[in-house]
Image (tube, grey):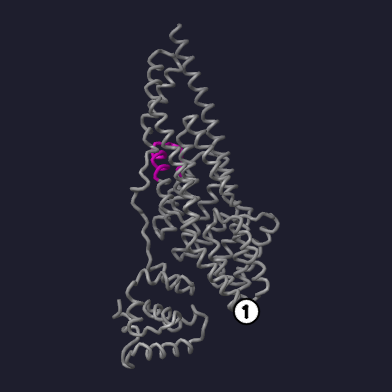
Amino acid sequence: MTRIFLVVLLIILVSCHSHSKKEAEKKFDVSLLKQNEQFRVAGEYDSLINLNKKYYKLADKINYADGKALCYINLAELNISLENFQKSQILFDNAKEILDQSEDDLHKARFYNVYGRFNLELRRVDKAFQYNNEAMSLIQKSGQSELKNDLLFSIYFRQAIYFIQKKNYEKALEYFHKAKKLDNSGLTDCAIGDYVYMNKNKDSAYKYVSTAYKKANIRGKDDGIALYANTIMGEYFLTNKQYDKAEETLTKALKINEKTKRIYAYYGKYIYNDLRVLYERTGDKEKAYFYLKGYTDAYYKTNTSLLAAINQDMESFITGAQKDAEHHKSKIHWIIFLSLAGLSLLGLYAWRIIRALGKRKEVLAMEAENLKTRMNDNKQEEVLELGKKNDPEFLNRFKEVYPEFIDQLLTINPNLESSELIFCAMLKLHFTSKEIASYTLVQHRSVQQKKYRIRKKLNIPGETDIYHFFDTLK
């Protein structure tokens, strides 16, 4: 009878402890992910870093490995926004190693959703689809949760973006509208307006863009959503030659960017470029030059001083995690001794903890410096896109892909101007005269005249096809 009583008591104690532990873990998840998203949208870098450090230590204290994985995912997502892809990959690897041992579909869905975004940034569209579809499958299998709708919104939103990359615009719009049902912030309105506008439906675009802009003003927050809304509203005004409104809105976007740039570092250069175009069109050459310089500085500084600071914070986080791992390792023998000493029911539970720790004690071991970059940097595609946008960075990127081409041109004629080198680069990429006219905002006749001048400067015979001539250069 006594033996039966002890068995029943053991089952009750283990069951009660297991239930309370699961409740604590659910509270951990909700609190961490809700606050993380608030800080991310607000552009509050320091708060986001400190939050994840604090919760990582808490997860370690309560032996919650999945909690550590969520911290890794949050910081990996931050580094995607900062275009710090190598560090993102390290953090994703550590999260995945933990989640491979997990049975929580919600956590895995969160991982694959963010990892899909990471792969899109590396131009792996098929991989992005694959991982986001995995996230969708997992979220559908997961039980009810306070976080489920938030994650489902993100999955739908990313799916729409991936369909745009695949040029399946009907499906993209379908998923945007699914996301919109779960979103009151105006973010989806921004994205739909941006998407519709890119597909040349300006009237419909204005409806969504203006809705997003109004929602951002009502919210009254200078955050990532307001940054997006003001930027696309400014670009809409710019395209429609409403230059006063464009200047006002883009200047506001730039001010928001100053506040949020430690998380949304990539936005600044686009706003600078929009302002550069604005002042070129209004004839203010001094301001156009100022913002062109600002664009160039922002482009290069993003990956130097700013990322140096970010890397320092990330290294501190990783080093701290490694110390935690070593701390656990040194305690294992002591815990084993206590369990074998016969602490009855608590000893049994301690043994389960040790067993779990034994499987995961090397989860945090990392060799950051020796990790090979897994990025598939498709520079050719990037150069084409920059050329189509008439981006000031086009020539520099072109030189990286065709390092000898410009030197050969300058050997033939050292007096070629920068604008002529850009024109030759576009011909090298086989842009048609019509395309060049469209991308550079000039008339088709001007492009033909420029071709004629280039022929003279490079001594290209009249009977030689100009594209064939550039094909013969490396």
Residue 98 vs 379, above or below: the answer is above
At 49% from the left and 26% from the top, the residue drawn is 18
Kind of residue sitting beneath label 1? Thr
Residue 351 position by quadrant: top left
At 65% from the left and 70% from the top, the residue drawn is 247
Q: Identify the secondary structure beneath mark 1.
A: loop
Quick one: quadrant of the C terminus? Answer: bottom left
Quick one: quadrant of the N terminus? Answer: top left
At 43% from the left and 45% from the top, the residue drawn is 91
Whole-percent x, y for residue 148 in the image? 54, 44
User: Is residue 392 found inside the magenta-colored segment of the image?
Assistant: no
Q: Relative to 361, is 55 on the left or the right?
A: right
Residue 177 vs 349, above or below: the answer is below
Whole-percent x, y for residue 345 in the image? 45, 16
Whole-percent x, y for residue 104 in the image? 46, 38
For disc 1, the marked residue is 282
Give the magenta part as a residue range. Answer: 93-108
At 48% from the left and 89% from the top, the residue drawn is 445
Whole-percent x, y for residue 58 in the image? 52, 33
* Residue 11 in sight here: yes
